[in-house]
Each structure stands twice: as structure tokens, then as C-alpha cells.
Amino acid sequence: MGTYVRPHWRSQGLGRRLILSALNHARQRPGIKLVQLTVTETNASAVALYESCGFIRFGAEPLAVAVGSQYVTKLPAGKRRSLTLDNGREFARPIELERRLHLPIYFAHSCHAWERGTNENTNGLVRQCLPKGSDLSTLMNPQLHSHPRALNHRPRKCLGYSSPHEVFHLRLPR
């Protein structure tokens, strides 16, 4: 969960009311066991507000930007249009990630796997090669690299029976 209060509304208790309302909503849902907020470490007033509402500080999310920078920036700029993420901890600072990558970032809703259809389909294809719980430490490097290569060259109906490799390298602008 995250909140943003525009500067002209600050110091009027709106942030506190938003957080307390969200907590009240969460308490009425038996399946919700944890409410997690992410705040920029340098935002002392937000940290103080969250702590006064009962939240406990448990550290920063250093992976949030590292994941995006490490992988996404390897793509040529012409092939980057947007990024859709799930709600994992590694994407805890989306505004900073968006600014560093110069990409619009979208989040899939929790428990809405169909919003990440290609991702879910690819996970299923990976599981055909590597069943869940497989010990990857027993595989040699060439074996590990052969699986993505095979998946990237496999024709997909959603791509007009072209492979992701063909679409990425032949059809998209550089």
C-alpha cells in the first residue's frame, strides 16, 4: 500500500486519515495478515506518520532499483515501451524505478494472473522443462542456457506463430 498527499493538503491530517482508513479496511478482511508500506528513507515526516500509526520499520528495499537497472537497461531504448510488474518486494520503489529507466511502469493487481498473461504462459512453459522444486544446482551452465534459448525460438500463437526471438530482433525498431 502506498499513499501520496499533494503538498497543499499536507499538515491537515489527510495522510493520517488515509492510512487509518486503509488499516480499518484491512482489519475487516480476515485474509489480510500484513499491511506493508514503503517509504523513501529520507522522507522523515512520512516515516514518523507511519510509525505513529503502528507500523514497524524493517529496512530499505535495495533491490527495488537494482533489478530494473540491471536487466531493463540492457534493452535498446527503441525496444523499451513500458514495464508491467507484479507486487513483489523487489519493485517497492516504482517512482524511482520509473525515473531511472525512463519508462512508464504499471502494476498488475494482486491475484489477477490474467493481467500478466505472457508471463504466466512463459512460467508454464518453463515448468515443462524445469518442474517446480527442481534443484537448479545440479544443472550445468549449458543446460540452463538451453531452456531460455528454446523458449525464445518457440513459435507463439499470440505472435502470429512467430517466435519471440523473431519479433524482438526482426520486427521491433532498434
Image (spheres, rainbow, N blue to C red):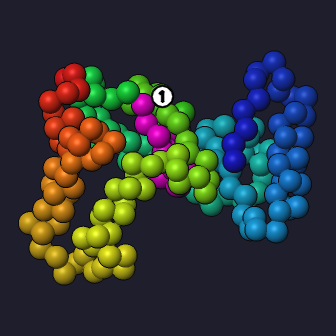
Q: Amino acid at mark 1?
A: Pro
Q: Is residue 52 magenta?
A: no
Q: Examine the rendering and report whether any part of residue 172 can be seen.
A: yes
Check the image and report above or below for 139 versus 110. below
Q: Determine which quarter of the picture holds residue 121.
A: bottom left
Residue occupying the point 33% across, 42% down: 158
Instruction: State the image coordinates of residue 153 (x, y, percent, origin top left).
Output: 16, 50
Q: Examine the rendering and report whether any part of residue 96 can be seen.
A: no
Which region of the structure is painted magenta?
Answer: 82-94
Residue occupying the point 47% across, 40% down: 84
Residue occupying the point 20% across, 27% down: 171
Front residue of this view, candidates 10 and 89: 89
Instruction: State the image coordinates of residue 142 (x, y, percent, origin top left).
Output: 8, 66
Front residue of this view, candidates 34 and 113: 113
Question: Left of 142 or right of it: where is 20?
Answer: right
Check the image and report above or below for 11 versus 109. above
Q: Is residue 91 magenta?
A: yes
Residue occupying the point 28% across, 80% down: 135
Task: Look at mark 1 in the image and give the residue it sits on.
Answer: 104
Question: Left of 159 or right of it: where is 139?
Answer: left
Q: Residue furthest top?
A: 8
